[in-house]
């Protein structure tokens, strides 16, 4: 199986690991959407203040619920 086929298989079985660069208004909800679909998501952000907040299962964006962050982190 070549790389493309392997990747497509991982995407269809939701076993692909996704990286999202920038956990802001676009990246954070995007990451949450993929975790709800069963994917493992690794988020990257240069803002060091956001990382501990998100890892603690808290939200820093008003319309995103802390429970949703906590569920994704867990
Ligand atoms: N918000 C929108 O409605 C919208 C619409 C169209 C396009 N965009 C584009 O999408 C992108 C993200 O927008 P946003 O609203 O989520 O911005 P945002 O400022 O809310 O989030 C961007 C995040 O990326 C992080 N970041 C910046 N440089 C980084 C790097 N080198 N490595 C890792 N993380 C980094 C920032 O710390 C921040 O947390 C922008 O390019 C924006 O122009 C946004």
Image (cartoon, grey):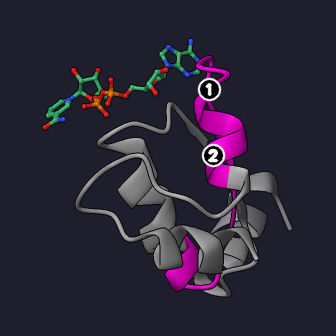
The image quadrant where one finds ligand 1 is: top left
Residue to which mark 2 is pinned: 53
Point out residue 60 in the picture as x, y percentages from the top left corner. 42, 46
Look at the numbered disc 1 and say if its residue's Cβ is closer than 8 Å to ligand 1: no
What's the magenta region? 35-54
Question: Circles 2 and 1: CB distance less than 8 Å?
Answer: yes
As helix, strand or loop, the secondary structure at mark 1 comes to loop
Point out residue 41 in the picture as x, y percentages from the top left corner. 67, 59
Q: Is residue 7 left or right of residue 36?
A: right
Quarter of the view holding residue 10: bottom right
Point out residue 65 in the picture as x, y percentages from the top left corner. 38, 71
Point out residue 45 in the picture as x, y percentages from the top left corner. 61, 27
50 falls in the magenta region: yes
In this view, the residue in front, 55 or 19, is 55
Q: Is residue 13 above or below residue 69?
A: below
- Looking at the figure, which quarter contains the C terminus? bottom right
């Amino acid at each position: 199986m070549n790389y493309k086929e392997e990747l497509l298989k991982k995407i269809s079985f939701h076993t692909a690991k996704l990286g999202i660069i920038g956990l802001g208004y676009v990246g954070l909800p995007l990451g949450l959407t993929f975790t709800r679909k069963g994917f493992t998501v690794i988020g990257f952000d240069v803002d060091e203040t956001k990382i501990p907040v998100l890892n603690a299962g808290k939200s820093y964006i008003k319309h995103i619920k802390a429970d949703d962050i906590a569920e994704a982190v867990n």
